[in-house]
Amino acid sequence: MDSSPGVLILCSLLCSVSAQAPVVSVEPRAATVRQGESASFRCQVGSGAPPVQLQWKRANNQALPDNAKLGPDSSVLTIAKARLENHGQYRCMASNSAGRSTAMAVLNVKYAPKVQLTQAGPLQVRMGEPVSVDCRATGRPRPTTTWKRQGSTLQLVTKEINYVNTIQWPAVHPEDSGVYICRAENSEGVAEVKINIVVQGQPGAPVASVGATEMKVVDGQTITMLCQASGKMFIQFPLPVITWSKLRAPLPWKHTVSGGVLTLNGVGRQDSGQYICNATNIQGYSEAYTQMEVESPPYATVLPDQVRLQPGDALSLQCLALGTHPIQIEWRGGRVSLLPGSETTKDGSLHIAHVILSDAGTYKCVATNHIGSSEALARVIIRGELGFGLRI
């Protein structure tokens, strides 16, 4: 046998290749399906001395579920008609005489939310007692949960910790009685659960109420909100004191309060929010809420408002509109509609690929919503024209 150094080195390389452990990968590395859908993963051997044996298991080394199917050479794993318990990691292990290696795949099984309350209704409590109700939601993707009172569209302020959304009162009052709904929603569906809370009150405690629980008003208006305190006759107890506040913000600086009436002068969009009326006497207190949304007509501007071009240049104008959405934007060349050759987009842009002399003129952007409309003008000057006029 030739024992020259070159032969020894060649043999060493060949021997190391022949003794190489397999290297594997899985495609895809993750798959997402709904319940009842199927998913497949392929285990691919990148290198390694043959023969290579492939084996699939769950990541926790447990056996595959009964709805798992393997291809003839065990390289393809298919989870047929996926179930919730199929969610998780799967491991492909490749082995030969030199060793083994593994690659992981993740199967995400989506499903619609399910919700459950910590206690069943109706829940009867006495006035002044603290009350809390937990709502636990499951689902994949993780659902969002909200609380609201039946008959109202307002989302209540709650606390969410470790996937549990809690509605709570430090001290309940008679006006807190009602049906409350916990709603869970994800991309797969919606689920709701209800609970009826009954608060037993005591004589003399005030019950606050407002004239309107929801208001949509127009920017610049003067708005009044009425709060009243009712209940048993306040004979032995002082009349309740009525105060107003705004959730998570101070009251607008242009406000006055008189006789339970809150007046807001010249409201703006920043004044939108939840307003709280509080009625208090020595027997207790209660709150009532008004949600106000301030809407505004559009305000349109055009950028640029003047442009100078040569024949053949491209024209591009952008119409910007502030105000309550949805806002519709329309471009006009003076008083008439634009002619073919111009292009408008949903974001309010106007484009003309190659202008000609007759494209010079004043262009008008009209922004409209359900409250009103606004106009803005742009002047287009094309060099070589004798004058300019409206695009017609």
Image (tube, rainbow, N blue to C red):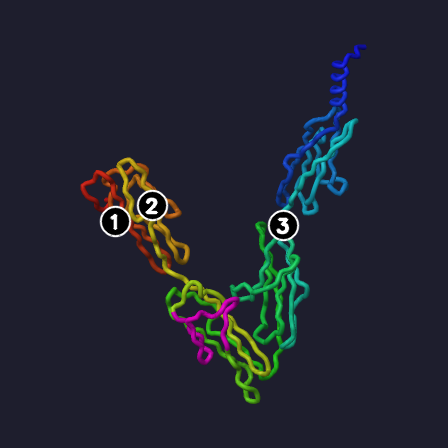
Q: Amino acid at mark 2?
A: Leu
The magenta stretch spans which residues? 243-265
Mark 2 → mark 3, Cα distance in angstroms: 45 Å
Disc with the residue nearer the chain's start (1 vs 2):
2
Label 2, residues with CA under 10 Å away: few <14, some 14-19, many ≥20? many
Report helix, strand or loop for mark 1: loop
From the image, state whether disc 1 or disc 2 is nearer to you: 2
Disc with the residue nearer the chain's start (2 vs 3):
3
| Name of the residue lying farthest toward the left | 386
Disc with the residue nearer the chain's start (1 vs 3):
3
State yes or no: residue 208 in magenta: no
Write down the residue under mark 1.
334
Q: Position of residue 61 (x, y in %)?
A: 77, 41
Q: Amino acid at mark 3?
A: Arg
Q: Is residue 142 left or right of residue 23?
A: left
Q: Amino acid at mark 1?
A: Gly
Q: Nearer the viewer, residue 245 or 193?
A: 245
Q: Are the residues flagged by discs 1 and 2 in contact, CB closer than 8 Å?
A: no
Mark 1 → mark 3, Cα distance in angstroms: 54 Å
Q: Position of residue 99 (x, y in %)?
A: 78, 30
Q: Which mark is residue 138?
A: none
Q: Nearer the viewer, residue 318 or 224?
A: 318
Q: Nearer the viewer, residue 368 or 149?
A: 368
Q: Position of residue 28 (x, y in %)?
A: 63, 36
| Name of the residue lying farthest toward the right | 1
Q: Is residue 115 left or right of residue 333?
A: right
Write down the residue under mark 2.
317
Write down the residue under mark 3.
140
Label 1, residues with CA under 10 Å away: few <14, some 14-19, many ≥20? some
